[in-house]
Image: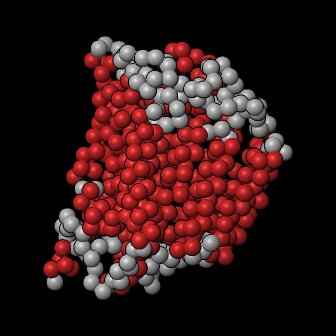
Amino acid sequence: MTLLLAALLLLTAASGLGVVLTRDPRRQVFALSANGVVLTLLFLALQAPDVALSELAVGTAATPLLFLVTLVAVRINKSRR
Amino acid sequence: MSVLPWLVAAWLFGVGVYGIVSSRNYVHLIGCLSVCQSSSYVLLLGLGYRWGAGPPIFYDHPPGTPAVDPVVQALVLTDIVVGATVTALLLALALQVHKRRGSLDPQELRPLDRRGS
Amino acid sequence: MTPRWRTLLLVLAGLVILPGVWRVAMALPPFGAPTSPYGQAVNALVPSLRHVSNMVSAVNFDVRGFDTLGEEFMLLCAVTGTVLILRGGRGEDRRAKAGRIAGRALEPRSDATVLICRMFGVFTLVFGFYVTLHATATPGGGFQGGVVVASGLLLVYLGEGYRGWRRIARAPVLDGLEGGGALLFALAGLLPVVLGRAYLENVLPLGTVKDILSGGLMLVENVGVAFAVAGGFAMIMVEFMEETRATQSEVEE
C-alpha cells in the first residue's frame, strides 16, 4: 500500500469523526465541506476521476449550501412564531 | 495493511451511527447520515481498485492497459448525486418538523410524550 | 428511551457485531487484488463494441442503462417530494419574485465576492456544459455535468444576489427541465422498441472512438440525465431559498 493511499484513508477516517463530533450545526456545515474535499482527494487517488468530480461539486458546494439555508430558515421561523 | 480500506469503511459507518444515536439536533443528525453514506463509497471504490492500474478512461492509453473496475465507479457516481437530493428531502422534513413543533431536538419530539403538543 | 440508554444499547450492539465485522474485513480480498471479472470484461470489450473511451459512462448509460433509469426516477421522486413538502407548507401564499422579510438585516456583499462570482459563475456554467458533452470521450457525463452546472448557478446567485438570480432561474423553466430530462431518458429507451428491438438497446450510429459524438443512444440519455440533475438541484435550491423569503401576504401587510 502506498503511503499516499494510507494517509488519505486515515485522513478520511479523521474527517468523518470531525463531522460527527462537531455538534453545532452551523460549524458542522464547514466540517461537511472539508469532508467533501478529503473524499475528493481519496477518490482521485483511487483512480476515479468521474466520481471525484461529482463529489467535489456535491459534497463541497451543493450539500453544505442546503444545510446553511435550512439553518437560516429555521432561525427565521423561530422569530416568526 | 491490505485491510485498511475495509476497516476505514467500518469505522466511518460506526462513527456515523454513533452520531445519529447521540444527536441533539436533527440537522446534525442528517450530517452524520452523510458520513454513513461516504463509508459505502469508500468500501465500493476500495473493492474496485487494482495495483498499478489507471482510471477506466481509454482516451490517452489504448484499450487493454490495466484499469480499475468501472462498474463500482458507476454505482458510486449515481449514488453521490441521488444521495444529495435525498439529503435535501430530509432537510425539508426537518424544516417542517421545526415549523410544527418548534424544536429540532429528537428528545423533545418523541411522539408518545404526553407533555408535548 | 433516554440518550444514555440509547448509547448503551449501541455499545452493546457494537460489541456483538464487532467480531463479525473483523471476520468479514479479514475475509475480503486484499486491497488491490482484481476482484470482479465483470469489470475486467467491460474494460476489455466495450471500447470496440460501443466505440466509446469512457467506461464509466458506458456502464451508466449502456451496459447498466436500466439501473440508471431507476436512479433518475429516484432523483425525480426526491426532488418532487422536497418541492411538495416546501411548497405545500407555504400553501398558496407564494410570490414569483423575490421578497425580503421586514426587519432582516441586509448584509452588503463585498466587491471581491461579486467580482469573483460573476467571473467564475459563467466560467463554471460553461465548464459544466463541457463536462456534460464529453461524456463518452473523457471523464464526464450527465451526472457530473449536471451538478457542476448547479454549482455554477450557485455562484451566479452569490454574484447577482437573490433578485437577479430569480430572474435567471425561473421556476417553470426548471420544472420543465427536470421533468423533461427524465422523460427524455425514458423515451430514448422506447426508440429501439419502436424499431422492434429491446428497450434501451443502442440503435443509433455508434460513431468513432474518442469523438464526442460517439456511443449512439448514450448521448441522448446523457443529455436527459444532465437536464434532470441540473434542473432538480436548481429547483431544490430555489425552494429552500424561498423559505427564507417573505410570502405574498407578508409583503402586502
What residue is rendered at 67% in x and 48% in y?
A42
Q: Is residue C82 left or right of residue A21?
A: left
Q: Nearer the viewer, residue B60 or C214?
A: B60
Which quadrant does the N terminus of chain C fall into? bottom right
What residue is rendered at 65% in x and 50% in y?
A41
What residue is rendered at 44% in x and 44% in y?
C127
Image spot of residue C215 (x, y percent): 43, 22
Image spot of residue C178 (x, y percent): 31, 45
Q: Residue furthest left?
A: C252
Task: Please count the marks in the image.
Answer: 0
Q: Nearer the viewer, residue C138 or C39?
A: C138
Tell me the quarter of the picture where residue C82 sits.
bottom left
What's the colour scheme?
secondary structure
Look at the picture and state if C92 lies above or below B72. Answer: below
Which quadrant does the C terminus of chain C fall into? bottom left
Tell me the quarter of the picture where residue C70 sits.
top left
Q: Residue furthest right?
A: B1
Q: Is residue A81 left or right of residue C27?
A: left
Residue C157 appears in view: yes
Image spot of residue B104 (x, y percent): 47, 75
What residue is rendered at 29% in x and 29% in y?
C187
